[in-house]
Image: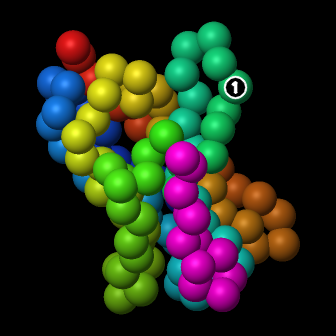
Amino acid sequence: QVQLVESGGGLVQAGGSLRLSCAASRSIFTINTMGWYRQAPGKQREFVAGITSTGITNYADSVKGRFTFSRDSAKNTVYLQMNSLKPEDTAVYYCHGVAGLGYWGQGTQVTVSS
């Protein structure tokens, strides 16, 4: 079993930055894939960024060049650095990991004002 705890969300003006953190309850190298998803009001949850079991990072087209996925194995934590934020980035952001089963964090709210 894996527990994932997100933090770092908040309110920011358009053009600003935030860094989200996702702390895992065990070594992130025992988790096959990890990623960030988001869900805006009235919309489906969508993939934002993530890393595969082979260490390849992927990004949604809408965030390429603005968001950066990273990890710190010593802290069992993955991050999402979000720069040049836009109002359309407003959503609840969820951390996701796959270790046999899929696990979700509780989510953290990101609100970008125009």
Q: Position of residue 81 (x, y in %)?
A: 30, 56
Which of the 4 image quarters holds residue 51?
bottom right
Left or right, 106 with respect to 46, comes to: left
The residue shown at (44%, 46%) is: 63
Figure check: 50 above or below 54: above
Q: Farthest right residue?
A: 100
Query: Relative to the observer, which residue lies in front, 56 or 37?
Result: 56
Which residue sits at x=24%, y=47%?
Answer: 83
Residue occupied by mark 1: 44
Residue that appears at 66% across and 33% down: 45
Looking at the image, residue 35 sits to the left or right of residue 110; the answer is right
Does the rendering let one see residue 113?
yes
Q: Which residues are magenta?
A: 50-61
SS under mark 1: loop
Depth check: 45 or 97 in front?
A: 45
Could you tell me which quadrant the N terminus lies in? Answer: bottom right
In this orientation, does residue 111 appear?
no
Percent x, y for residue 50? 56, 63
Relative to 106, say whether 24 is above or below: below
